[in-house]
Amino acid sequence: MFSGGKTLVIQADSSDTVALVHRKIHVPAIEQRLIYRGKKLELAQKLSEYGIQDDVTLQLVTRMHSSRHPYMWKLMNDLNSLIHDLCNCNDNTDININVTHMTKMLTDFLEMTPKDGTNKSEEYPQIFTHSSIPAVLVKLYVSPSVTKKQAAHECIRQFVDSGKTLFVYPVTVYRLFAPILFEFCKILREVVGVDDALYIFCRSNSCKTLFTNRVTVYRLFAPILFEFCKILRGAAGVDDTLYIFCHSSLAKMMEWYVHNVKYKLRLQDVFPFVHELATRLSHALELSVQSTEFIQLSESDVREFIKFMHPVKCAIWRQKEFGSLVSFPSLMQDEAGNEGSEINDVRSIFCDLLEKLELCLKKVEIQLGLANIERGEPIVRCWSQYLLILKELERVSKLYKSLKEMFWEKMTQRRVVLCFLIGKLSKKSTDYQWILEHKEVTNFKIRQRFALKMLREGRQKNEELYKMLICSSCLFEDSFEYIGHGKAIGPGVLRGWFSLVCEAIFNPQNALFVSCPNDSRRFFPNLASKVDPLHLEYFIFFGRMIALALLHRVQISISFDHIRDADPYLYSSCKKILEMDTKMVDEDILGLTFFCEDVQLGFRKVVELCPNGKNTIVNCENRDNYVNLLVKHHFVTSIAHQVAHFAHGFADIIIDRRLRESFYRILDHEDLNRMLHGSKIVVSIEDWKEHTNYSGYKRDDPQISWLWEIVGSMSTEQRNVLLFFWTSIKSLLVEGFGGLDSKLHIYQTLDSHDCLPSSHTCFYRLCFPPYPSIDVMQNRLNIITQTYVGCSFGAE
């Protein structure tokens, strides 16, 4: 019942708060009070706490305006009257004088509002809105008079621009200026619609003002704290002191954010922006699918959608315990208990945009015929917008179990076009990391491309180049000495040097690495490497070598592999333990306890895998843990120093820590093997011929026909030696000859027929005179394809 005797019937639940009832009445709580049985109802309390039942009458009474800020109330009343006068006057009146006066009064309001962000200062924007200033300004804006409409348009724009200048600190923006912007947007949305130019201006400035001033600490540091809490919770438990510290710090940060930011950024204020922008984007995407052309998306729509989604995600984030995922349906309750519908609408927006984007990606794939992805297709501007929206949807999907699975399942279906787009659109190696870290939606070629970008960008800029004088008889020693100071130059010499130095590194006599029993090209660090007092320095050297080999795309014919290849006996034993019948394990038939023996330099050393390991019997309940600890000891703990020094050497070349970490995340060990080892396929003669040019010879000359006939009859080892002699390449890239930076060349020389072929490996050039017969040519080629000749260091 209103104080004047009129009544209004509303429906409310007993769990609703008094604040929600005020909203349903559509009367601001600052101007009215609800009374029940002579007692004022507090906004934060629930109706049930006052014993309010069905068919109860509440009294709504007017508050007396506080005597605080009398000048501000008077200013707003005068401004309201002035705007009403403008609305009612005719166009013949001199409007300019009144508009100037109105603009000054609006500026006075902004300047008089305290900028400290306290509760007292919050009363000023409340006075502004409760005086109906936004409403009467919009009333003037929708006036049939063009002059009045233009006057209101300019006043509102100038007011917003001045506010952006005066309110610069995050707390003042959120507490003082944002409520006014939201009020303008709300009224304009209802009166003139979302396509009106002034509404779009206010919405865009709400976005710019709010999110350019967003608190950096919360934005950047909170996700790190979340990750720490998540890992510590799983590894150390919730009673761990470090976990408690991190959790407490995160809680304080969240409490600050909720109090200073989220409290003022109500979901009801922000979500309409999200909904209308998502609708616009969905419509544009649908048009793009239906059209023969790609429809350009509005960059401002995409940008603002992403920014306005931030507080929505924060609301979802707060819905459950820190770090947990949310399942639909679920409700988010704020002080007024009215956020649930908005949060549940996020799912509809997510599914709609994801479906439209998948269709657009499919259209790209079909129209460009990405079976032949290497063609030089022009870049369409909207493609980058597709990926920006997808990135935002991926962020949303992390908050919900079902959406995360749905998102990556659909992206896997569009794997080919995703690789095409990120390859076309990327400018830096760190672009599209969120895609690259999901290997199921990328291929080796694109991961290798970005990894090489990271290696190039991660080097120290303005680095100096050094010449290296290497004696072939002291290859390893000289290289170790020089690599501490610089890097070799000259493509051909560099490739040959890499290959031969790596052979020396993995030479069993150096005891740094042990080759796998089933494949001598696969290696892992030797536990007994400490026999050499310089072994850790050598591992630093090797880390530098591997980084440089990757950087210069040199295949060194080595790889690192799975435990089953590194130690087949250990792998087989562990597999049997895990697969053995439960009863047999519990009967202690194996006679195993939690310890193992290391053999170093002929001596055996007993190592306990856990405290009191020698007395802890392996049974069916702990056998998984036993196998994990055993493998960890052999391949992690026992060689930790060697691996750490290898990583140190790698970091000496790729000094940017962020890029180095990204490099590790996007590649797995199989990718590294393919980059280091190269192709495992036998060299194709046809591919070789297709990528070879001739100078002085013609393709159908006898000498050329003889050459390919002889190469075709060579063994695999002889072909590899010839390839190394010709190019200083031990193993081809995975792409074959097509992956090289230029074609191979055969040059005719004027030398005597007695001369052997020569090479210029820097230019992939093989030179030989016109031999008189195939037998003479075969004799000369047989000489250079002997390993000690063709694989020697120092070819030009």
Image (cartoon, rainbow, N blue to C red):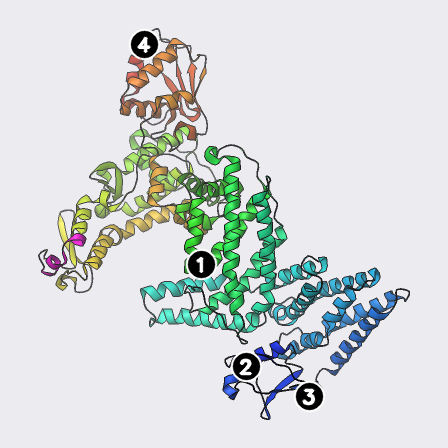
Q: Residue at x 33, y 72 (%)?
A: 239
Compared across the picture, whether 680 is left or right of 305 comes to left
- Whether pointer 3 and pointer 2 mark residues with C-beta atoms closer than 8 Å, the reply is no
Q: CA distance from mark 3 to mark 1?
A: 53 Å
Task: Tell me residue 641's x, y (percent).
Answer: 29, 52
- Residue labelled with disc 1: 398
For mark 2, does the 10 Å Cα neighbourhood hold few (<14), some (14 to 19), or many (20 or more) residues? Answer: few
For mark 1, does the 10 Å Cα neighbourhood hold few (<14), some (14 to 19), or many (20 or more) residues? Answer: some
Looking at numbered disc 1 in the image, what kind of residue is underneath it? Lys
- Residue labelled with disc 4: 774
Between 644 and 677, the residue placed more toward the observer is 677
Q: Which residues are magenta?
A: 577-589
Disc assigned to residue 5: 3
For mark 4, does the 10 Å Cα neighbourhood hold few (<14), some (14 to 19), or many (20 or more) residues? Answer: some
User: The C terminus appears in which quarter of the rendering?
Assistant: top left
Which element is circle 3 on?
Answer: loop
Q: CA distance from mark 4 to mark 1?
A: 67 Å
Looking at numbered disc 4 in the image, what kind of residue is underneath it? Ile
- Of pointers 3 and 1, the one earlier in the residue sequence: 3
Q: CA distance from mark 3 to mark 4?
A: 117 Å
Q: Nearer the viewer, mark 3 or mark 1?
A: 3
Q: Is residue 585 magenta?
A: yes
- Residue labelled with disc 2: 44
Compared across the picture, whether 100 is left or right of 187 comes to right
In the rendered view, tell whether residue 551 sits above or below residue 151.
Answer: above
Which element is circle 1 on?
Answer: loop
